[in-house]
Image (cartoon, rainbow, N blue to C red):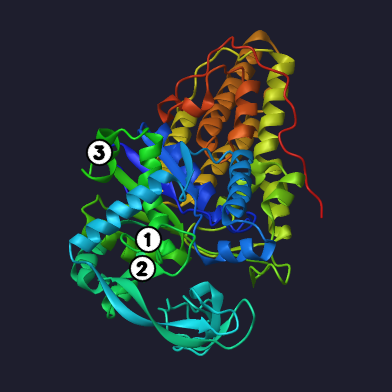
């Protein structure tokens, strides 16, 4: 999707649920979103990038009870953990908040009240699981049982082991208490529902015009074609945002979590009513959500319906990534089919992980992580193509010239860089970050071939004229390296800054625009002694 230049852009990443440590499956959303933001800025867009911790819901309460601590302590621990991981990976948010902030409680209450006043919320008696042994009503994640649609093992709000359908309170078959393991019974209880069914026509039209990835639109359309069911938006918990007018109920976590996008914008803008309203009330910004495929329903159906009902601006695009597997197996902590990000970063440079996550698979396709494929990407591409080009060329130039030599940039090189620029922009607009990487690595490969073909090492040993030509060849390859740095900074920010410095560049690479790609690298600019960019990795 082409982003208009006359509006600011708000990019969000789905909120990590802070009930455990970050694994590489999480990063399929955050790293591409960060790359997208960096590239938009290089294209000249005014962009803010926000996310934050999803802090409410039953799993956090369960974890807190198991440890004998308050939910706030669980949230604080993992909120800080995710912030450290994002910093280590250079996922550079303009603001990273948390949904248990005072601002998010206030904004959630305001939006829910607006939906109530507009007639989109109603109260109804509904059945909820009750455990006689524990003497308590059981919110969805406290319940396990059988899916009424496919018969698979399911939890109270979702058939997570089978068909993936959302389950309303009272639907699950043969419920059991997750705390004590005993059978539960259903009892009547008051709850509040969002009239989602009233938004079917609106959603059908909205999805026809929604930007982003096709998988998000198509998945949501299938749901809208079916009969949309109203959503139960309250839970009987103490931890969460209180439902207006009720002390015994909190709003469902999938109500207050996406509202975090709004409240985090408010917090970033220090509560400047005029400024944040431009983004969320006056259609004054382009809003792009990066999410995983497992939460398409919430972002393409429930969320826009809520926004429409409450009179807020609607997202312009939803970008849904494919899921991540480990050696062909679904992520499972109990079976050990998981790669923890903190352990990964103890052994490997963060830029190698950023590169792998986008180079290995198309963004909307499933990514099957394996150590073999990771080693191949690092050794064959980062070491064999990119690292080889940087080391050979910069070492040769530093040893024989010490500075960027004199000479004109050849038309062939300008054309190749310009073609790469267009491929990179198209890739970003298609949310195909693998195409971005492939285009730039193709330019690096061309640089290797050009250097080998022209053989400057022979020329510099001959007369002055031949040496002058050898210097011109070197300048042309250095120009290609300059372009590679600008285009790959979004993917590998630390490593490209290293190369940028070796080229003698003193400007801030992150702020350099794509317009600089074909601006000739300055002759006479001092080069720095190169260091090896990447190390080969072994099993």
- Percent across and percent down for residue 407 are 54, 15
Q: Secondary structure at mark 1?
A: helix
Q: Residue 491 vs residue 249: left or right?
A: right
Residue furthest right as drawn: 539
The answer to whether residue 315 is seen in the rendering is no
In the rendering, which numbered label is found on residue 255? 1
For residue 396, above or below residue 157: above
Query: Which residue is at a point 54% across and 57% down the rendered structure image?
Result: 17
- Percent across and percent down for residue 492 are 59, 38
- Percent across and percent down for residue 136 are 52, 77
For residue 438, above or below residue 93: below
For residue 389, above or below residue 316: above
Q: Secondary structure at mark 3?
A: helix
The Cα atoms of the two marked residues, 2 and 1, are separated by 7 Å
Which-is-in-front pick, marks 1 and 3?
A: 1
Indicate which disc, 3 or 2, sits on the residue closer to the N terminus.
2
Query: Which residue is at a point 57% across and 18% down the rendered structure image?
Result: 505
Relative depth, front residue between 523 and 259: 259
Q: Secondary structure at mark 2?
A: loop
Q: Dot 2, how many residues are within 10 Å of its Cα: few (below 14), some (14-19), or many (20+)? A: many
The Cα atoms of the two marked residues, 3 and 2, are separated by 28 Å
- Percent across and percent down for residue 52 are 49, 47
Relative depth, front residue between 113 and 160: 113
The answer to whether residue 57 is seen in the rendering is yes
Query: Which residue is at a point 46% across and 54% down the rendered structure image?
Result: 14
The Cα atoms of the two marked residues, 1 and 3, are separated by 22 Å
Indicate which disc, 1 or 3, sits on the residue closer to the N terminus.
1
In the rendering, which numbered label is found on residue 233? 2
Q: Which image quadrant: the C terminus? A: bottom right
Residue identifier under label 3: 278
Q: Quadrant of residue 205?
A: bottom left
Q: Residue 236 vs residue 58: left or right?
A: left
């Amino acid at each position: 999707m082409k982003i208009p230049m006359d509006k600011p852009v708000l990019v969000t990443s789905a909120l990590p649920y802070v009930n455990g440590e970050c694994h590489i499956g999480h990063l399929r959303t955050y790293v591409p979103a960060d790359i997208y933001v960096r590239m938009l800025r290089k294209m000249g867009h005014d962009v803010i990038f926000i996310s934050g911790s999803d802090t409410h819901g039953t799993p956090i309460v369960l974890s807190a009870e198991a440890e004998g601590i308050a939910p706030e302590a669980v949230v604080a621990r993992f909120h800080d953990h995710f912030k450290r991981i994002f910093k280590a990976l250079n996922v550079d948010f303009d603001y990273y908040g948390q949904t248990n902030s005072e601002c998010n409680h206030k904004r959630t209450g305001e939006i829910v009240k607006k939906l109530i006043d507009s007639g989109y919320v109603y109260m109804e008696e509904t059945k909820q699981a009750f455990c006689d042994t524990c003497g308590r009503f059981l919110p969805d994640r406290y319940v396990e049982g059988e899916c009424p649609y496919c018969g698979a093992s399911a939890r109270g709000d979702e058939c997570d082991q089978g068909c993936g359908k959302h389950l309303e309170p009272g639907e699950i078959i043969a419920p059991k208490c997750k705390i004590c393991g005993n059978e539960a019974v259903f009892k009547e209880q008051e709850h509040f529902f969002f009239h989602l069914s009233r938004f079917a026509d609106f959603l059908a039209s909205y999805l026809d015009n929604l930007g982003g990835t096709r998988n998000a639109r198509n998945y949501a359309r299938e749901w809208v074609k079916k009969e949309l069911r109203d959503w139960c938006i309250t839970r009987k918990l103490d931890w969460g945002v209180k439902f207006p007018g009720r002390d015994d109920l909190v709003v469902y976590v999938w109500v207050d979590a996406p509202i975090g996008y709004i409240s985090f914008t408010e917090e970033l803008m220090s509560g400047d009513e005029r400024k944040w309203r431009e983004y969320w009330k006056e259609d004054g910004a382009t809003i792009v959500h990066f999410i995983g495929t497992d939460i398409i329903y919430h972002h393409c159906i429930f969320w826009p319906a809520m926004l429409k009902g409450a009179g807020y601006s609607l997202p312009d695009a939803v970008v849904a990534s494919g899921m991540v597997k480990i050696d062909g197996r679904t992520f499972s902590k109990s079976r050990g089919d998981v790669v923890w990000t903190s352990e990964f970063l103890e052994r490997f440079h963060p830029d190698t992980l950023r590169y792998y996550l986008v180079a290995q698979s198309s963004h909307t396709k499933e990514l099957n992580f394996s150590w073999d494929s990771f080693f191949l990407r690092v050794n064959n591409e980062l070491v064999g193509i990119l690292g080889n080009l940087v080391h050979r060329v910069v070492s040769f130039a530093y040893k024989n010239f010490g500075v960027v030599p004199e000479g004109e940039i050849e038309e062939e090189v300008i054309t190749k860089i310009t073609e790469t620029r267009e491929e990179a922009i198209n890739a970003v607009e298609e949310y195909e970050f693998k195409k971005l990487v492939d285009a730039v690595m193709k330019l690096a490969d061309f640089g290797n071939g050009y250097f080998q073909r022209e053989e400057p090492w022979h020329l510099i040993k001959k007369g002055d004229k031949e040496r002058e030509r050898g210097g011109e060849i070197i300048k042309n390859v250095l120009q290609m390296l300059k372009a590679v740095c600008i285009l790959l900074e979004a993917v590998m920010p630390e490593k490209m800054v290293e190369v940028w410095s070796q080229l003698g560049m003193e400007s801030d690479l992150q702020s350099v625009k794509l317009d600089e790609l074909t601006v000739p690298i300055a002759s006479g600019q001092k080069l720095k002694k190169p260091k090896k960019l990447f190390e080969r990795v072994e099993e």
